[in-house]
Image (spheres, rainbow, N blue to C red):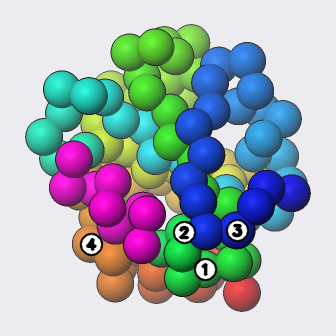
Amino acid sequence: MRGNNMVDAINDQNYEEETKDGVALIDFWATWCGPCKMQSPVIDQLSEERQDVNFYKMDVDQNQNTAKNLGIMAIPTLVIKKDGNIVDRLTGYTPKEKLNQILDQYAG
């Protein structure tokens, strides 16, 4: 289990291993993506507030295999996994309140 209050950067090599236990939110993003820059602080805030979810980010330019395997065509895309299975997926900017409500369905 990872430490609290942080968003861990993951890659193609460790994606499956890192996100196989509990509830995980993975933020698929890129440096050139404007909406990703809006989404990132929301993910950071939630990672500090929620101990019941593991938060990760993956740069799709540097890790194209996972994004391709998941069929991610637009970013930001947030993928929520529970015990290794994808249970939800959000494309585009998602406000904090909405994201909290969605996470409440799977965690807590």
Q: Position of residue 52 (x, y in %)?
A: 72, 77
Residue 12's disc is none
Given the image, on which type of amino acid does mark 3 rest? Asn
Badge 3 crowding class, 10 Å Cα cut-off, few under 14, some 14 to 19, many 20 or more, is some
Residue 47's disc is 2
Q: Where is residue 60 in the image (x, y as percent from the top left)?
A: 42, 23
Q: Name the residue under label 1.
A: 50
Given the image, on which type of amino acid does mark 4 rest? Pro
Instruction: Find the distance from the CA under tag 4 to the CA under tag 2.
Output: 14 Å
Instruction: Find the distance from the CA under tag 1 to the CA under tag 3.
Output: 9 Å
Q: Where is residue 77 in the image (x, y as percent from the top left)?
A: 38, 44
Range of the magenta residues?
A: 37-45
Instruction: Find the distance from the CA under tag 3 to the CA under tag 2.
Output: 8 Å
Q: Of callouts 4 and 2, which one flags the residue occurring earlier in the amino acid sequence?
A: 2
Where, quadrant-wise, is the N terminus in this rendering?
A: bottom right
Identified at 62% across, 24% down, the residue is: 11
Residues under numbered marks 4 and 3 in contact, where contact means CB atoms less than 8 Å apart: no
Q: Of callouts 1 and 4, which one flags the residue occurring earlier in the amino acid sequence?
A: 1
Q: Mark 3 points at which residue?
A: 4
